[in-house]
Amino acid sequence: MQVTKKSKHIIFISIFILINFSVVSQNNNDNNLQTEQINIKNDTSETKQKFSLSNIFKRKNKTETTKKDSSENKKKFSLKQIFKRKNSPDSINAQADSSANDSAGTHKRFRIFGKHSDDTVKTNNIEKPQRISPGTWNTMSAEQQDSLLRAWDEYDKEHYKKKYAFTQKEKECDMKRDKTLTDKLILKKAANKPYKYKRKLINRKIKRYRKTMLYERFDKSETAPSDSLSDAKRYQLINKQYKREAKQEAIRKNKVILKFDRKEERLRRRYKLTDNEMIILNKGKGMPLKGSEKIIYAKARKKQEKFTEKLLKLRRKRSFKLQNKEVRKRIKAEKKEIKKRDKAEAKKLKKKKRDKEKNKKHDSSEYPKRYF
């Protein structure tokens, strides 16, 4: 009984091994047949194109590599590729593979975020000045601080010049004789560019002054009245205070300049002559005009006169606002004195006129002669 049980186990194990072996051999045969069929197809396609001895000795693995490349190219577009970092290991490997296949100059990568190197504004031979920080600013001398602020002003002028310059399209629209509605809209938008450029520079300057004033603010111990301060320290504090007041005045004046520049731009736009008015105005200076042209000529002259009057008033206000507090008080006091003087002189003139009218001699029969 024991012998028969052992023999049964051996038989079952041997059958199981044979079945597994046969399945594996069938799979291998199938794979070999498939690879042979693929190779035959590739050979036939190659022979159709050109027959050469080098194609006979080519390795079979090349077909597999071409398959892999085609499958990689047919991959779906994913958003992850857009948001990948430039210096990440995956992106570096991808760049290395792409540079091997395609040249960097012919194909530019599509990006939603991040500027291209060509899009950045390059200043003309002006390097970016040193960054203004509390640690470096307070250690600098007065001359170094002034030179740094001047360097930033020059850098801003060059940096924003390209941004607010007139484009080629705007120049072409301006050169056209018959302007369409789109051309007029483009020119209207472009007309504000000089003012925007000036406003940008002034706002940048104001921010810089405010930042430096924050770094230079006084401590409570310095502002408190005490006799313990030395003469040198007191001189430094007074100098610092004057400098702070000068910056505050500069910020105020820059704001006034922006305000009145905007008013002047509006005034110019309001009283701007049309093309037809300009032609007739120039024509009327050297030639006789017709009836309809005379009306347009008179209208254009009135426009110019009103514009000059209002511009002069605006300029007077501007010059007054740009003065210091003390100067403005003095100007107001002088104006009051001038008004009083004018009133007194006007009264004297009226009195003289009345006396002349009373003392007139009449030779007519209605009014008898008056003798003194």
Image (cartoon, rainbow, N blue to C red):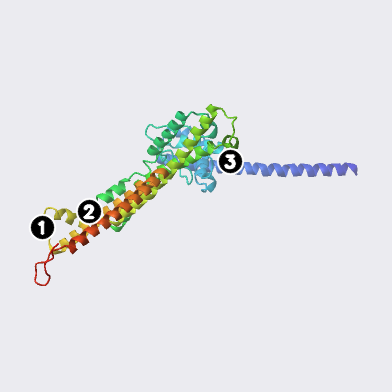
- x, y (%) of residue 197? 37, 44
Q: Tags 1 and 3 in contact by the CB under 8 Å rule?
A: no
Number of labels in the image equals 3
Could you tell me the amino acid type at mark 3? Asn
Q: Which residue is mark 3?
A: 32
Residue 288, numbered label: 1
Q: Quadrant of residue 155?
A: top left
Q: Is residue 304 left or right of residue 100?
A: left
Could you tell me the amino acid type at mark 1? Pro
- x, y (%) of residue 161? 36, 41
Q: Residue at x 47, y 39 (%)?
A: 245
Disc 2 or 1, which lies upstream in sequence? 2
Q: Is residue 32 left or right of residue 293?
A: right
Answer whether residue 365 is visible to the viewer in this image.
yes
Q: CA distance from mark 2 to mark 3?
A: 78 Å
Q: Nearer the viewer, mark 1 or mark 3?
A: 1
Seen from the viewer's position, the closer of residues 20 and 366 is 366
Q: Which residue is mark 2?
A: 177
